Each structure stands twice: as structure tokens, then as C-alpha cells.
Image: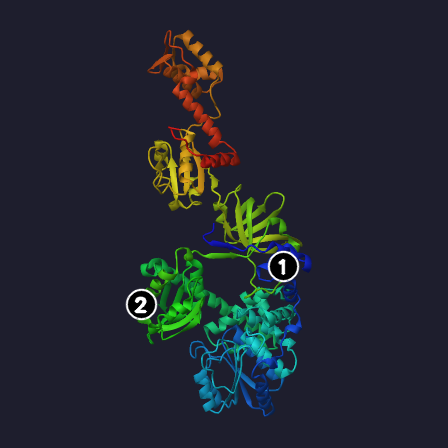
Amino acid sequence: MTNKRWRIQQPDEQLVTLFQQALQLPTLAAKILVARGFQTVEEAQAFLHMDEQVVHDPFLMHGMKEAVERIRQAIEQQQSILVYADYDSDGITSATVLKSALVELGANVTHVIPNRFIDGYGPSERLFRQAAEDGIQLIITVDNGIAGNGPIAVAKELGLDVIVTDHHEPAGTLPEADVIIHPRIPEGQYPFGELAGVGVAFKLAHALLGRFPEHLVEFVAIGTVADLVPLHDENRYLVKRGLEHLQRTQHVSLQALAKVSDVALEEITEETLGFSFGPRLNAIGRLGDATEAVDFLMTQDTDIAMQMATLLDEKNKERKDIVADMTKQAIDMVENIDEIRDSRVLIVAEEGWNPGVVGIVASRLVERYYKPTIVLGIDLEKGIAKGSARSIEGFNMYLELDKNRDILPAFGGHPMAAGMTLAMEDVDELRERLHEQAMVCLTEEDLIPILEIDVPVDVSEIDVSSIEAVRTLAPYGVGFTKPMYGIPKTSIQSMRKIGANEDHVKMELGDGKHTLDAIGFHKGYLADELTKGIELSFAGDLQINEWNNHKKAQLLISDVHTDDWQLFDLRGGNKISKWLQKMPIEETTFIAFKRETVDYFTTLIPKEIALYDEEEELSTYTSYIVFLDLPKHEQQVKHILQTVQPMRVYAHFHVANSHLFEGMPTREQFIWYYSFLKKRREFHLRQHLNDLAKHKGWSRAMLIFMTQVFFELKFVTIENGLAKIIDNPDKRAIESATIYKERKEQVALEQKLLYAQYMDLRDWLDLCRQEQSVSEEE
């Protein structure tokens, strides 16, 4: 069950209807467009049917003419050109695009990528000096350089020409490069400022080649998606075009990358790029030297491509193992060190942590604890801590770090993420300060994760064709995110655990008229937390499940929410240890109505059992309760339900000796038995009761009960097992005996609570919750 705050958008229904009719779209697709902020049919039409007209002239970019002239001069004079790239997917694909174009034009070109651990990010004075020694005459940076003022100044002193192509935020002072190509410099000159680094490199390649480089657009798609830039305008067109080419790519490197990613070419989507291709290219730069990744993407040798793709795959697995190990260590720190666990900003630091993956680990901790998080690797030799931060809504990481410049000699970033370096002895001080700052700007509610649901849908709106129509809106990404669907007010028709270890859950949702399959991977626990017959809301992704050439709509469950209380039926369940595993014991109150029940269950339940006393307050009862046995009166159950208003009721209702199937003796049975005793005058119960029971076909227990009724009404005496008739007793109705009343009520309670159908029991308990107790005065 959810521990998140659901934020559900409610799209303008009139606009949805307009889009449906004007654009010939199913409701689902129309709702997504409205949720994404489209206000007119014309806007939506342009978005859906984007073509090459959205591609801007590369020479609109400031400096493009000068850059092309200088590069063509270098090619004509066979000067040595160095493409200098960043070590992530965007940088690797940027270098591939530009170097491919230069090779095609006959340039004398090499490339280099700085080592994350030796050179750090951006232009490196060491590598620029090495380039000068190697005879390089022109350096072209891709996906970096706009903040490389110092090293670029050194390159100029060494007599090198430098062209910077970048898309990152420029600092106050620009580097003294020969040419700077940047989509936002000067502000507003180029029509679209959100290109990725590979997009800028592609524009330069376009200008150099004099045509749209169709054969390089696959690499642009990979870098653009991996770098998380907005998928608007040119970006959207380039990714969409790139995906079309990827699904039939002739690049052997990309064919090999698809193979190690275990994806068929024709099934490549933007998710493949973001979760399979991008991470594998990133991994090599996170763990070491990424220079050979460009050689891999450019190779035309199938065998070499497969070898390199396998290496990237292995590096990615190595990266995953490192992340998993560091995450485990970090979690151990959070949960076992008080000052870390109790802080509103989590800061964990350890010697030897790989600085290439600290950002990933920080993201994992935010997912788990939903607190702003900083993960630092400690370098004992240098006495520094270096790492990355990830934040949550309500805590502007950059601004909060900015308040601590006196202990943060180097940091940068934005509201949701940052990188930093500080002295290792200041780590605890930073934690204390950020905790105090977070106490001011973060409330308890802010620390509850938010789930944004932007497309509420009804089960009746979901089918294979509507999901296929939604796919035509792709690619999804930053600025046009994949929708999170919300299905409000539905119910579970069937549910079962699946998988070898029953780790997953399969459900059928709906109202009987319309149904939808749903699956929750690694959510097998939901089968123990959800019941049929209640109103539930589901959140997740809609997919098409294809099996044996049969297509069916399916919800991939992300989260579940309900405001309804739930009844869990444990009646007849003798394996207490089994059902104890399915409930949160610490959050649950175990209730008994009889002392003997407490004695029986004490050794079986690892928690104190509450013996119900109607004179005591029920303030210690939690919102999850277990009725271990039957009450003496139904009013006891009503009292608990009305007072506590529990969200979960576990019905066990253990009965040592059930009376239901014997029922109550009839009036005729009482008359016959009394006449029998009256004729005999006395009857030895121990010696002859079994014979009488056999003779009449009644149970021994029934005869004992009738004898006890006669004893209470003073119709007989009982001494040492001998029942004697009393002459001329007072006339009293059988039904007036207390023991008769108790048995009758017990039989009724067994019928109502122990043997009732599940929905009948739930309806009765629900009525009990709603009824208001009437005071004695009333």
C-alpha cells in the first residue's frame, strides 16, 4: 500500500473532447495531450505531425560560419584536428558525430576524452599541453568547454586554435576561444536553445557537410535522450528520426549494442536509449577512460563491434555491482548511525567510494528515504570529500549549499542536483547546518513522497487500440514525460501471487462489465495487503501484453491507494505462523474476549495480547486489529469498531467448541428429556448418558446442556453425577435460563461471524463501524 501523496491532474474535459474529435484520437491520447499543456488543436497538430521543417538552419547559430571556415582551412591544409569530448553518453556520441563528419571530409582528425579520475570534467591543461606536443593545431570541444577558461587560455598560449561547442550553462566570463558555438550564446539568436551537446555537434556537422547528416542521426538520438534535455522542437524531431533509423540501423556498433542489451532492432524505443544504450556508454566513463567508446561507435568491423559492445556490457555490470555495494553500505550507515538517520538531509561519506557513481547512489537513497541526500567519496591522501547531491521538492539544493560557501570551496548544480568538494573534516559540520536549514524549509508533509498522476482513466477507456494510439505520441522524455495513469475507484475481481518465489502479483481489475489485467513486479506483498470488495485506486503504466499472438491491455502497477477499511479472513486458519507472516505485527493489536484465549495464544503470538474489558479505554488499540476469538456479545465488537475505526480487521474468531451445527435443542426435545427424568426420578449421568445419547441419536453435549438448563431453573439437582428431579418446581420458561440465552447468542454469533460468507461478514462489520452507540440515558 502507498506511503505517497498522490497528486492527480484533472484534464479539461471540453478540451479532451475537442482533441478527440478534431484529431481523431481515442480518449486516452487526447487526455495526455491536454495533460501536457496543449491548448489548441493547431498546437497539438503541429506536435503530432512534426517534420523536417522544424530543423533550423545551422548557420543561424552564432559563430557557425567562422567555425566552418576554420575547419575547412584545416582540412585543406591537412592540419591535425583534435575532437575533445566529455566522458558521458552525450559527449561520446558528440565526438562520434563530429569526427565521423570530419573523416568523411578527409580531415586529419583524432579524439580524446579526459579521464574522470585524473583530469576531471571539462578541458584539461594536461591534455591540451599533450595535444600541442603531438602536433595538434586545432582543438574542437564537444559537450564541454564553455567553463574551461584556464585550460583554453593555456592552449592559446601554446599556439593552438580552439573552437568550443557546448550546451551547458555559461559562466559570467566566457573562455577566450577562437569561436564559441552555443545555442544560447548570444541569448535568443538561435531559435532553439535546448539542444544537447550532440545536437550542437550535429549542427556543426550539418553545416560542414552542407546537408542534413541522415546517417548520423541515430547517435544524436542516443545522446539527446541520455542527457535528459527537453524533447521539444529540434530535439524531438532528431530523436524521433533517430529512432526510425535505429530500428533498421546499418551501424554495426549499434547492432552489437542492441544485441548485448537483449533488444530487437525493430523494438528499440526511447526507453531503450535511456535505460540500455545510455547506461552502457556511460559506464566506461564512470569507471575509467571512455576514449575507446568513440572508436566502438565508429567501427565498421562486426567482430570488433561485438567485442567492444561486450566490454561495455561488462563495464555496465561492474558499475551496477559497485552501485549496489555502495548503496548497501550507505543504507547501513543511515539505519545504524543516529546522527545520519535523524538528520533531515542525509549525508553519507566513506573512503574509497567511486566518485563516478555517487550520484546514482544518492538517487537510490532519495528513492528509499525521500530526503535530500549527499553521497561523498573520501580521499584520505588529499584530505577531501567529493561527491554528488540529489534533492526533493521543497529543498533547493543549490541555494541551500550556497549558504555554506565558507566550507564548500567548490560546488555547482541546480535545485534538484549538485556536485561538490569539501574538506573531509567539514562533512559533519555540513550535515548539521543542512539539517537546521531543512528544519526551516521542509515540513513533515514535505517528507512524504509525491506521486504525480497526470492521466486519470476509467477501465472502460482502456483497450489495445487506445494504448497503440498513445504510442504514436512518442518519444517521451524530459518536457514530454511518459504518462503516469491513475485508475480511481475500481475493485479487484481476482488476485494471485505469481513467480517462482511468489514475488509478483497478478490481478484483474474492474466492475464486472469492464475488466483490465494488472501486474505488479516485486509487489507480491500486495496480495497480503489488499482484499476484494473494497474501492481502490491504482497508478501505473499501461502496456500491451502479447502472448501466443494474442494482445491484451495490461496495467503495470506502480502504486495502490484506498480510503476503505479492509477485512482479512483468517477464519479456520490453524497455521498461525503462516498468517502472522502476512501482517505487520508491531502495528497490529491482537484482541481476545476470553482469558483462556489469551493463555492459548500467548506462546504463539510474539506480542502482548489485549484482553478486552468494556470498562477500559481503547486508546492503546492500533488501526490494525485481530479478533482472535468470538465475543460474548456482538456489542463488544461494535464498541471496538466504532471507537477505534480500524483500517484493517483480521477476523480469526477462534472457537474451542462450536455449537452452531448442533444448534439449540427444540422445545419437544426439552419436553421429552424432562418427562424421561421425571419418570426415572433420578438419572446417573456418568453411567448412562452415553447410552441415552445413542438411543435418541442426540449428542452427549446436547444432553449435558439440557441438564444444565434444568439445573439452573431448579428442575433438577446434580450431585456426584446423579441428576434428581425436584417435585413441584416453580414454573419458569426454558428460554429464561441464562445458560440458554448465552448458548443462543453464541450460536447466533457463530452464524454471523464465524460461518458467514465473506461479503456478509464485511457488510455486518461495516454497519457496526457506522452505527453510533446509544447511551443508557438515551
- Please give the count of numbered marks on the rendered protein: 2
Q: Secondary structure at mark 1?
A: helix
Could you tell me if residue 559 is visible in this image?
yes
Above or below, 571 against 7 in this view is above
Which sits in the foreground, 373 or 286? 373
Q: Residues within 10 Å of mark 1 (few under 14, many from 20)?
A: many
* Residue type indicated by callout 1: Val
Q: Is residue 465 rendered to the left or right of residue 412?
A: right
Q: Is residue 130 above or below residue 406?
A: below
Image-based side of 496 in relation to 470, left or right: left
Color style of the picture: rainbow
Residue at x-position 43% and y-position 84%: 150
Would you call the spot at circle 2 few (<14 residues within 10 Å), some (14-19), or many (20 or more)? few
Residue 203 numbered tag:
none
- Residue 442, x across and y down, in percent: 39, 60
Residue 259 pos. (x, y %):
59, 67
Q: Quadrant of the C terminus?
A: top left
Q: Position of residue 388 (x, y in %)?
A: 42, 69
Q: Earlier in the sequence, mark 1 or mark 2?
A: 2
Name the mark on residue 429. 2
Q: Quadrant of residue 252?
A: bottom right
Q: CA distance from mark 1 to mark 2?
A: 50 Å
Q: Amino acid at mark 2?
A: Glu
Residue 45 or residue 462, whichever sits in front: 45
Is 710 situated above or below 416? above
In the picture of the structure, the residue carrying the numbered disc 1 is 470
